Image: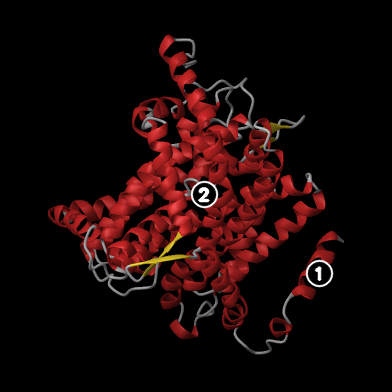
């Protein structure tokens, strides 16, 4: 009955033009109805001031300034803590008796599945096609600085998490903003920021976790399958919604199981995805080893050139930072939701694990994708996203589009289920764990997958990016205020590791 009631209510809220679309193709209808809303959201979030004729969004400054501040304030923990991060994630400190639901590696896998995804494939392609090779430099720099932002937010995510009587963990920016700021006498500010954070995470779950992921997975599927099944006569021609329905069905099967089920799936999928995609990239780079130095020269020249493809020097910086953040999500508050579930008594330990994410996601995977696209060429003026990446790989490995189709679906699938979990935890926070609200969210998320499979890339990407960057506004305010607490915790943890008080258990 709840399902019937919800679907009836959902139908009642749809614009009349949707319900009366008649014979209008589903894809056309979706883009006509939702396109104006996605553009409005993007224009609002990315409002800024002009520098050299280019709009510099304030939210981009907000994020990169914070990442730079945390890196210096934490004395470059992204470098000096890297070795300890690898020790922790290897399982040497895992204690099954510690509070939490998943291991350090499983928490990292779940969070990575939300970041290492189609942003690395389609997002990088978009960055280079718009900003040129120089955008890659600023992506790498943003990823390096973002490692510390990720450390700070995930340390707080574990510190202020809640564990119920059944051992189920709830954590993330909603909790450390409300509880952490309350400790400092900022109760009202904490409540407001926590609510804004929860709402923006839900928006991110729909925009990035549902719309963008299924859209680009469907695009690659259609690009590969349609020519094999009759071209314009194929049932899949302009039939992204068919892929969306099947995709949504399998996502629905997984999200019923909660974080333990999600972490088990991502723990299995993430290494496979990395092996498939990174392996193919390495093959191409090895076969073009002589061109790699030229590609890096193009990256450095383009990074500081006043003549970028779009917007010159300032435009390239903006594009690089935006795409890096879209990919690794550092400072947005999404990863702490997954890392809060880690089995540990040491919040700093999980923060150190988390700083590996931007390194893997942006410094390694995004850079490899960028090198392949730059070496192959043909990116000027392209707007296809994943199609551009697929074409670049196919120029060397003719059958790679088929492999990329599988990898893209796996990337998208793991990211979608992780982002579903992020949104669910936010709904739990706002609704006081209401079963009816959780059911409504499940149905809405699945519906968003079907809608997203039929939207255009521009509309999808603008909306997804806007929803992600909206998360940074309340989250970074809290991180700034609580940074001294994190630094004290870090100093204590490193001293105890050095003295032998904290020992590996394996």
Which x, y percent locates residue 407? 43, 56
| Left or right: 143 in relation to 201 | left
Residue 491 vertical placement versus 317 (above, below): above
* Numbered badge on residue 9: 1
| Left or right: 459 in relation to 324 | right
Which residue does the image show at 38% across and 55% down from the upper left? 321
Residue 106 vertical placement versus 309 (above, below): above
Give neighbour class at mark 2: few <14, some 14-19, many 20+ (Cα, 10 Å): many
Q: Residue furthest bottom?
A: 23
Mark pair 2, 1: CA separation: 30 Å
Q: Secondary structure at mark 1?
A: helix
* Numbered badge on residue 411: none
Q: Which of the two residues, 152 or 116, is positioned nearer the viewer here?
A: 152
Which residue does the image show at 57% across and 72% down from the upper left? 40
Can see residue 107?
no
Q: Residue furthest right?
A: 1
Which x, y percent locates residue 384? 39, 72
Can see residue 55?
yes
Q: Which of the two residues, 272 or 493, is positioned nearer the viewer here?
A: 493
Quarter location, residue 161: top right
Residue 364 vertical placement versus 168 (above, below): below
Q: Which of the two residues, 240 or 474, is positioned nearer the viewer here?
A: 474
According to the picture, the residue beneath numbered tag 2 turns out to be 114
């Amino acid at each position: 009955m709840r399902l019937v009631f919800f679907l009836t209510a959902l139908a009642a809220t749809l614009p009349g033009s949707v319900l009366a679309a008649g014979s209008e193709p589903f894809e056309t209808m979706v883009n006509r109805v939702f396109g104006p809303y996605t553009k409005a959201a993007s224009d609002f979030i990315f409002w800024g001031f002009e520098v050299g004729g280019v709009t510099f969004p304030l939210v981009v400054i907000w994020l990169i300034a914070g990442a730079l501040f945390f890196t210096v304030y934490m004395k470059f923990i992204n470098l000096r803590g890297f070795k300890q991060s690898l020790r922790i994630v290897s399982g040497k400190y895992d204690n099954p008796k510690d509070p939490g639901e998943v291991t350090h590696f499983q928490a990292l896998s779940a969070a990575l599945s939300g970041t290492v995804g189609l942003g690395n494939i389609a997002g990088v392609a978009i960055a280079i096609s718009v900003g040129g090779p120089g955008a890659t430099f600023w992506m790498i720099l943003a990823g390096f600085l973002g490692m510390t932002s990720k450390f700070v937010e995930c340390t707080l995510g574990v510190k202020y998490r809640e564990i119920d009587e059944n051992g189920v963990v709830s954590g993330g920016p909603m909790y450390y903003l409300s509880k952490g700021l309350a400790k400092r006498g900022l109760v009202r500010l904490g409540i407001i920021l926590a609510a804004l954070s929860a709402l923006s995470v839900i928006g991110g779950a729909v925009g990035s976790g549902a719309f963008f992921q299924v859209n680009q997975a469907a695009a690659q599927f259609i690009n590969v399958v349609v020519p094999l099944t009759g071209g314009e006569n194929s049932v899949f021609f302009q039939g992204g919604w068919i892929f969306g329905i099947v995709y949504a069905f399998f996502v629905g099967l997984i999200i019923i199981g909660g974080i333990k089920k999600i972490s088990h799936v991502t723990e299995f999928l993430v290494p496979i995805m990395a092996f498939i995609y990174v392996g193919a990239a390495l093959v191409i780079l090895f076969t073009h080893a002589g061109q790699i130095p030229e590609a890096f020269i193009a990256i450095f020249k383009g990074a500081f050139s006043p003549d970028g493809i779009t917007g010159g020097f300032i435009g390239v910086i903006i594009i690089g930072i935006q795409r890096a953040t879209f990919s690794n999500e550092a400072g947005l508050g999404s990863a702490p939701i997954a890392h809060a579930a880690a089995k540990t008594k040491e919040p700093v330990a999980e923060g150190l694990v988390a700083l590996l994410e931007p390194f893997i996601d942006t410094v390694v995977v995004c850079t490899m994708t960028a090198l392949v696209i730059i070496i192959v060429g043909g990116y000027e003026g392209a707007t296809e996203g994943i199609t551009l990446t697929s074409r670049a790989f196919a120029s060397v490995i003719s059958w790679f589009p088929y492999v990329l189709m599988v990898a893209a679906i796996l990337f998208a699938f793991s990211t979608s289920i992780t982002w579903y979990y992020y949104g669910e935890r936010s709904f739990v926070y706002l609704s006081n764990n209401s079963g009816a609200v959780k059911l409504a969210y499940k149905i809405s998320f699945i519906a968003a997958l079907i809608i997203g499979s039929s939207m255009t890339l521009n509309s999808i990407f603008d909306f997804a990016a806007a929803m992600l960057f909206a998360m940074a506004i309340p989250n970074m305010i809290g991180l700034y205020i609580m940074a001294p607490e994190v630094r004290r915790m870090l100093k204590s943890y490193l001293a105890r590791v050095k003295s032998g008080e904290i020992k590996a258990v394996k």
